[in-house]
């Protein structure tokens, strides 16, 4: 079956660093995506990993370990505007089917 | 470049009715996917169309259907609406081809309420 797990909620302080974990078990694997979704808005793309290792993009980094079925999103120098839900999604290799995790709601406090 | 657009943005229907939602992808994107998002179930994949063909389908009943036109615009239809169909329906488009990125671009969604 397809299963993706993420913590439901996290809280962090402005200026801090937070790591959001994602574990997955899917029938295939063709890449892992992270999306950000502010309340009432559509998800927007943050990062993509298909090979093991760290991908860095400004304040955001994403890590993937395919052997462990594990990824994390690292957010540095947190800002209030980073308060949002963060969705982990796996593209399985049977066509272009995306499986999304339940999302992690991050609250950044002053 | 214009983003993904969806119409209507909000819709209220009664149980038993049917509804059609529309999605216009980003110009040049031929892949269009549909998702249902609810607080309890999160984002769930409905189906994906590419060049007017349904290429992939999620685990939803046959009441949910879709199609894609030659200009890549897509519609999804839900027949015999149930209360549980109340959700945000998101459409996403993606560019495919050699050298193209793989991320999906989401539209603002259609908020469907079934009473």
Image: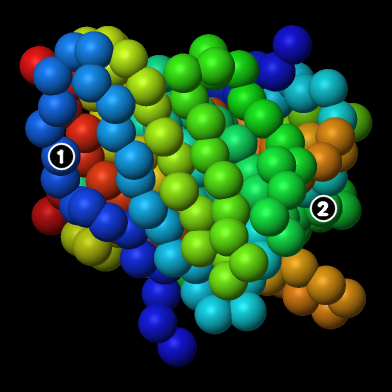
Give the image location of residue A37, x and y in percent. 35, 50
Q: Residue at x 66, y 49 (%)?
A: B49
Q: Is residue B57 above or below residue B29?
A: above
Give the image location of residue A28, x and y in percent. 86, 30
Give the image location of residue B8, x and y in percent. 22, 53
Q: Which residue is denoted by mark 2 in the rendering? A: A50
Q: Residue at x 85, y 34 (%)?
A: A94
User: What is the chain identity of the residue bearing mark 1?
Assistant: B
Q: Nearest the camera: B104 or B52?
A: B52
Q: Quadrant of residue A21?
A: top right
The quadrant in which the C terminus of chain B is found is top left
On screen, residue B51 versus residue B2, left or right, reads right
Q: Which residue is denoted by mark 1 in the rendering? A: B11
The quadrant in which the N terminus of chain B is found is bottom left
Give the image location of residue B85, x and y in percent. 30, 19
Q: Is residue A72 above or below residue A60?
A: above
Q: Is residue A94 above or below residue A19?
A: above
Give the spatial CA distance, label 2 vs label 1. Answer: 38 Å
Q: Residue at x 63, y 67 (%)?
A: B70
Residue at far bottom of view: B1
Q: Residues within 10 Å of mark 2 (few under 14, many from 20)?
A: some
């Amino acid at each position: 079956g397809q299963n993706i797990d993420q913590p439901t909620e996290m809280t962090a302080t402005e200026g801090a660093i937070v790591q959001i974990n994602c574990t997955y078990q899917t029938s295939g694997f063709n890449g892992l995506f992270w999306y950000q979704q502010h309340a009432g808005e559509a998800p927007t793309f943050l990062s993509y990993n298909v090979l093991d290792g760290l991908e860095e993009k400004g304040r955001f980094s994403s890590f993937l370990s395919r052997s462990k079925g594990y990824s994390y999103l690292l957010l540095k120098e947190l800002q209030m505007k980073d308060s949002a839900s963060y969705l982990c999604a796996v593209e399985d290799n049977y066509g272009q089917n995306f499986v999304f995790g339940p999302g992690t709601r991050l609250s950044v406090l002053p | 470049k214009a983003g993904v657009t969806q119409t209507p943005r909000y819709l209220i229907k009664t149980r038993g009715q049917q509804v059609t939602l529309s999605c216009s992808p980003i110009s040049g994107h031929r892949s269009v996917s549909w998702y249902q998002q609810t607080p309890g179930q999160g984002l769930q994949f409905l189906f994906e169309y590419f060049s007017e063909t349904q290429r992939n389908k999620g685990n939803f009943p046959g009441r949910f259907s879709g199609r894609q036109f030659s200009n890549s615009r897509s519609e999804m239809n839900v027949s015999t609406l149930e209360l549980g169909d109340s959700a945000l329906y998101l459409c996403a488009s993606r560019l495919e081809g050699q050298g193209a990125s793989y991320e999906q671009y989401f539209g603002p969604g259609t908020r469907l309420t079934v009473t």
